[in-house]
Structures are given as structure tokens and as C-alpha cells.
Image: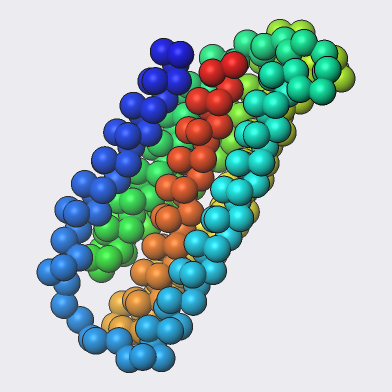
Amino acid sequence: MLSALFIAMLTAITVWWLLIQRLKDKPWLKQGVVPTSQETVTSSAPKVGLWVFLAVVSSLFGLFASAYMMRVGGHGGLVTWQALDEPSVLWINTLVLVLASGAMQVARNRIDADDFTGGRSYFLTAGLLTVVFLAGQIFAWQQARAGGNLGPGSPAYAFFVLLTAVHGLHLIGGLWVLGRTTARIFRVDANSVVARSRLRLSVQLCTTYWHWLLLIWLGVFALLLST
């Protein structure tokens, strides 16, 4: 119970910090070319597509969470649930993912301010921290296996691998997009309004994706700790 409350507090602090970072950017003070209707439609379509995708991802994890709770409750006369001792490295992994999301937000703020050099550094840092997180998740599997939570007789371990693996696969997909966006940061034409606008959009989409997967992971971690 205390662990779940701690995760809830961590989630609230994370959301608050991200909002503060966004407000520091003062988007209401920005000046620039007023976009045409065609430019507005072009920039809105990827955002709508991303939010639809995130809604699907959230529904997927919601279904997993429902199945998890039903299995914990022993519905259908299933074998009594034996809780898994969550590997301690998960706490470190969570902190690493929080830092990755924070670095992504700072990169977005820098690039919105046309500081491509600083934005590039933080963007690369976010990618590196994400790779560290994924490596930490693999190590967590090894820790869980070392604890003897193996085989068909251990549904807790099976659910643990399922939840962390599916979340990790979404991050791996995000890393591919992050790599492409990083390449665009290196070759962006700072004198082109269109190029800068497209780059900002790509970075914004990456940032939103990372923030959302961070919140999903915090929910998954809280679920694992609660049982």
C-alpha cells in the first residue's frame, strides 16, 4: 500500500515538473509566421495520429491490468496466486526513465527556442537513458528468474515479463523514431522556417510519446507493487 502511494506521489511530482518545464518555455510569448490553413492541417494530422495510437496503447495496457487483477483474484477456480518479489532494480529503472522523460522535455524547450546544439545534446541523453532503462529491465528479468519464479506454475512471473516486455517494445519503437529525429537535428537548415517547424513537430511528438510511456510504466509498476 505504501509503495503504491509512493508511486502515485512520484507520478504527481513528475506531471508537475513537466508542466513547470513547459510553462518556463512561455509559448504564449513566441512570435513567428502565422501558419496557413494547409500548414495547420499538415502539423495537426501527426498529432492526432499519435494520440489515437496512444489511446490504443493505453487500452491495451488497461486490458492487461484487468486480466492481471482477475488472475490475482483467482477467478474461474485458478491456482492460488503466488506473489512475485519485484526486483529492486525496478526502482532504479523507474528513476532512469523519469530522467529520460525530463531530458526529452528540456530538449523540446531548447529546440523550440532554436537552440539546436543544446537540444541535440539533451535529445541524445534521453535516448541513452532509455537504452539504460531497457537494459535494466532485462536485468530485472534475470533477478526474478534467480529468485525461482519460473515456469508455467508462476503466473506472476509470466505477467511480469509480459507487461515489461510490451512496454519495452513500445520504447524500442520510439527509439527508432528518436534516431531519425536526431539525424534531422544534425542536418536541419537553421535558416529555413519550414525545416525548423517540421523539426519542432518531430521533437514534440517524441516528447509526448516518452511522457505517456513514462506514465504507463508508473501505472504498471504501481500495479506490480500492489500485489
Residue projecting furthest to the left: 29
List x then y, in percent, for residue 55: 55, 55
Q: Write the residue at 48% across / 33% down.
A: 218
Image quadrant in which the C terminus is located: top right
Q: Quadrant of residue 144?
A: top right
Q: Write the residue at 24% across / 86% down.
A: 34
List x then y, in percent, for residue 42: 45, 83
Specify the color scheme: rainbow
Q: Write the residue at 67% across / 37% down.
A: 64
In the rendered image, the vertical position of residue 183 relative to residue 67, given as above or below: below
Residue projecting furthest to the front: 76
Residue projecting furthest to the right: 152
Horizontal side, residue 96 vs residue 137: left or right: left
Q: Write the residue at 69% across / 19% down.
A: 72
In the rendered image, the vertical position of residue 49 relative to residue 143, given as above or below: below
List x then y, in percent, for residue 41: 43, 84
Q: Nearer the viewer, residue 106 or 65?
A: 65
Horizontal side, residue 123 vs residue 148: left or right: left
In the rendered image, the vertical position of residue 141 relative to residue 204, given as above or below: above
Horizontal side, residue 121 vs residue 180: left or right: left
Q: Is residue 148 visible?
A: yes
Q: How many labels, in total?
A: 0
List x then y, in percent, for residue 52: 55, 63
Q: Nearer the viewer, residue 71 or 182?
A: 71
